[in-house]
Amino acid sequence: MVVGIDNAVTATKSTISSAKKTPPTLSSDSVINFARGDPTMYESYWRKLGDRCSMVISGNDLMSYFSNPGNLCWFLMPELDHAIRRLHGVVRNAIADDDRFIVVGTGSTQLFHALLYALSSPNEPEPISVVAAAPFYSSYPEETEFLRSGLYKWAGDAYSFNKDGPYIEVVTSPNNPDGAIRGAVVNRKGGKLIHDLAYYWPQYTPITGRANYDVMLFTFSKATGHAGSRIGWVIVKDKEIATKMVKFIELNSIGVSKESQLRAAKILGVISDDCLNSGPNKEENFFEYGQHLMSERWEKLREVVKRNGVFSLPKYSPDYCNFSGEYTDHNPAYAWLKSKEGLNSDNLLREHKIVTRGGTKFGVGSKYTRISMLSSDDEFNLLLERLSAIKVTTNGNY
Amino acid sequence: MVVGIDNAVTATKSTISSAKKTPPTLSSDSVINFARGDPTMYESYWRKLGDRCSMVISGNDLMSYFSNPGNLCWFLMPELDHAIRRLHGVVRNAIADDDRFIVVGTGSTQLFHALLYALSSPNEPEPISVVAAAPFYSSYPEETEFLRSGLYKWAGDAYSFNKDGPYIEVVTSPNNPDGAIRGAVVNRKGGKLIHDLAYYWPQYTPITGRANYDVMLFTFSKATGHAGSRIGWVIVKDKEIATKMVKFIELNSIGVSKESQLRAAKILGVISDDCLNSGPNKEENFFEYGQHLMSERWEKLREVVKRNGVFSLPKYSPDYCNFSGEYTDHNPAYAWLKSKEGLNSDNLLREHKIVTRGGTKFGVGSKYTRISMLSSDDEFNLLLERLSAIKVTTNGNY
């Protein structure tokens, strides 16, 4: 199928090279953006792996709408299905045995919508309430509300939810923005839970057990850093829910990019191979690399924050990680910064040319703000430098 | 960036080979499915092109969420933007000059949703009516209705629409299912038009002019046959509409697969190159190939339908095609079959192991049914064979 590969490479090199923009040079004047969780910090790891993760796609590959017509999720490629189940088995972070259904989506965002559709019903007298404990992921409210659906509606902070009847609670653990390990909060009859486990991977948190919830949401973006591929997956126990999710994705986009699925399968497969390699040529696997890098960054950040005394950070206790076989620290994908003096943290940091996402977007006060820990090394170092420069002046101003 | 390509190919060959299932052998007992528009008939063309359309993606490519942060559509890859505008210029089927915005989507289906969102308003007292002239694309009603949006609602056949106030009319031309060339039907104040031009390409219809509507929807699936990539695009004049569409795709899936975008850019680019090639080595370009193949299929189908006398097909007059520089026939992607005796066409064909999509799904009677003309050669030949075998018996039954 792959004929005359030299030509293919020649022809394609130009395509991809031009797709890779040189990042703008950072200067002391540059505004640096930490508001988004763009996981560019993993790029150097994948570059180091060279051709082991390369894939070649010919013009006549992957043309049909269908990936696996006999499967409930007919647009899920069997290679990705296999790679997902295998990786969860290797990492031991979730039960993905063959009796569970896997539904693939265009990122976990499309799957969040698919879940709202699957867990609600057109036969109910009013839209089902959707809640999450504050601070919650800043996009949940708008994603739930923006189409003014009659099936579901955003009902805010789970801690203050006191309506009778069915509801959906989104439990994000480790939590975005604050890295907390969480359980359901409402715990009432008629509740349906979405467990968003996007960050339940060894680089961010100790793997303390195999998650075994009804509905578990994961995303390629945060697992490996491949945000541009837009691949997410849900592991679901109930066939009816899986069927409704598949229906949603049919009606929303008639399936999910096969190119991305195949690439995700390849990359997840390489990670599993490396994790299982105990031979003499064993190198640092992806999660070990990520864990070391995140650990180092958190140490540096804590040091700077401690030294300047303006902010505080959440504290986490180490836990035994089943994946690494040792006690490891929590190194969340975001730093949840709190201004000690109760000032607006986001505004304060913007004055120092650091763009973050303020606490009000997460359903809490403006003394909090969220900083991505997943940026490139250059940007992260500049962040440390600028944070160091924020000092309390003698009159109490910053 | 692509290092040790031999290894990459070795590693990847197995991945893609296993992704390509051998199609089940067709026997005289096989039920054949023509209900879907899976464009598998183009595979052999792309296979013939060999490595000219191959692309290599390394593990560290395409990782960021962002494709072009300075662009209104920040997730659209510049390569695809360029390839789309260039192809429309070459084919002369639509104006895609630099003053128009291009928004990419996960297939044209996601863009249809984005358009409903962009053309409606949360400030209106009631949902905006969405109409299309019957027979209309069978998915429009369900796509519009399934989330019970308070922003828009399906209002049925445009011919019988007589409500005052704003509305959205979807104009599909050439039309799915019947191949008709169409204009707007309602033509009242407050109307907003979506022109779905998925089939306005030379293999299906003569290109009679450069379409210049406010909102024009295209899809990679039907243009080139790459349905598995889930790439569609909209050319839009108004900045505010483009901005709202981008917002929809942000909230629905945070962008569109970069792997698919880059592959679409590559393939559209090869088509443009070949169309522009007037050198001595000029070979049949993609649209010439498609036009010949569709023309041949339609001739055979008309012959069989004429001979057995059970059904009729729409008639179209040839038109001058600006792309090919000659009069060409309309060769729609679907055959819109009508049973002469007013029987249920879909049921009748199912008895002969041919699955189609019945007229009621398109807003008209069951004497009509839609047959995909885009299947593989083997399936299409079996279709002709089975249609030939349907005969009126002496008692008037089939």
Image (tube, coloured by chain):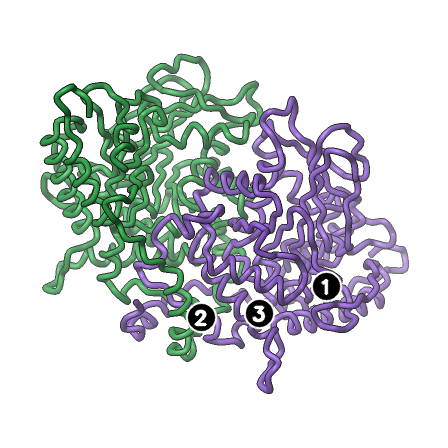
Chain colours: A green, B purple
The residue that label 2 is drawn on is B54
User: Residue placed at 36% from the left, 33% from the top?
Assistant: A214
User: Residue placed at 27% from the left, 39% from the top?
Assistant: A372
Measured as percent of width and height from the top left, residue A155 is found at 43, 20
Occupied quadrant, residue A373 = top left
Sooner in the amino-acid sequence: mark 3 or mark 2: 2
Disc 3 element: helix
Q: Are marks 3 and 2 in contact (CB under 8 Å)?
A: no
The residue that label 3 is drawn on is B272
Q: Which mark is residue B207?
A: 1
Occupied quadrant, residue A28 = top left
Q: Which mark is residue A249?
A: none
Sooner in the amino-acid sequence: mark 3 or mark 1: 1
Q: Chain of mark 3?
A: B
Q: Are marks 3 and 1 in contact (CB under 8 Å)?
A: no
**Neighbours of disc 2 within 10 Å: few (<14), some (14-19), many (20+):** many
User: Residue placed at 75% from the left, 52% from the top?
Assistant: B369
Sooner in the amino-acid sequence: mark 2 or mark 1: 2
In this rendering, do the residues under marks 2 and 1 share a single chain?
yes
Q: Are marks 2 and 1 in contact (CB under 8 Å)?
A: no
Q: What amino acid type is highlighted by mark number 3?
A: Ser
Q: How many marks?
A: 3
